[in-house]
Amino acid sequence: MSSIVAVANQKGGVAKTTTVVNLGAALAERGDRVLIVDLDAQACATFSLGRDPEDLERTASAALLGAGTPVADLVIPTNDGVDLLPAAIDLAGADRALAALRGREYVLREALAPVRDTYDWILLDCSPSLGIITINALTAADAVIIPLQCETLSHRGVGQLMETIADVQRLTNPQVSVAGILPTLYDGRTVHAKSVLADLGPRYGVPVFSPIGRSIRFAEAPAAGRSILATAGQSRGAEDYRRLAREVADVVRP
């Protein structure tokens, strides 16, 4: 059965989508079967994997918002060796649509259940919010990775996310755990970034993954619709995500 990992932080611009796409590609490069689930109406993961959301007739909303379409019928392959459950703008109203449903926190978990045996990893790209879709992701997940830019202001909101995860553990998913905080956009040349990195473990009391360095290569890859492992496979950024794949496998599936 697959391990489901949610990549979540309600703050935008912390490299959630970059992490999902490149971690997924790195796990696939290791020979694992990977499904990426785009849960953001901005559909950045979908675009980053070479699919135009406006050209897709059916997306994740067909499985989540009442149509009941099986996830297996919605999944599409990508050139990076991962499968994709794509998103589009119609997910923008998902929180409102789910609000009236009984058991609304479990919709995603139930939708993914039939494909869990198909994959080794299911990675959930969460939107920058703590709405019902993000609660669904945390309820479906075995583990959570929290990307965090190594700047002081990026700490804002992480405590609230940790409280939300604690509520999910208490109410809907006792098994979910925080796999760790992932420092992103890291510039080891600055004293500030080093001090923020050193503070993460003691402040939050959870594991801290090796940081992902800042690189222009991450901005270039989505334009090609590929991961950084495909567009700049020998770059430091690609190696950072290969290392992260090993660390996540050790933590989540020891």
Image (cartoon, rainbow, N blue to C red):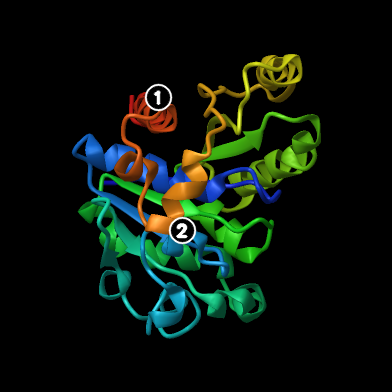
Give the x, y percent position of residue 3.
Answer: 35, 43
Residue shown at 55% from the left, 29% from the top: 180
The answer to whether 80 is drawn above or below residue 181 in the figure is below
Say which label, 1 or 2, has the lower sequence index: 2
Q: Which residue is mark 1?
A: 247
Q: Count the numbered circles shown.
A: 2
Disc ID at residue 45: 2
The alpha-carbon separation of the residues under discs 1 and 2 comes to 22 Å
**Label pair 1/2, CB-CB below 8 angstroms:** no
For the residue carrying disc 1, how many other residues have a C-alpha within 10 Å: few (<14), some (14-19), or many (20+)?
Answer: some
Secondary structure beneath label 1: helix
Residue 199 falls left or right of residue 208:
right
The answer to whether 237 is drawn above or below residue 126 in the figure is above
Residue 218 shows in the view: yes
Q: Where, quadrant-wise, is the C terminus in this rendering?
A: top left
Give the x, y percent position of residue 68.
Answer: 39, 81
Residue 49 falls left or right of residue 10:
left
Residue shown at 74% from the left, 21% from the top: 203
Disc ID at residue 189: none
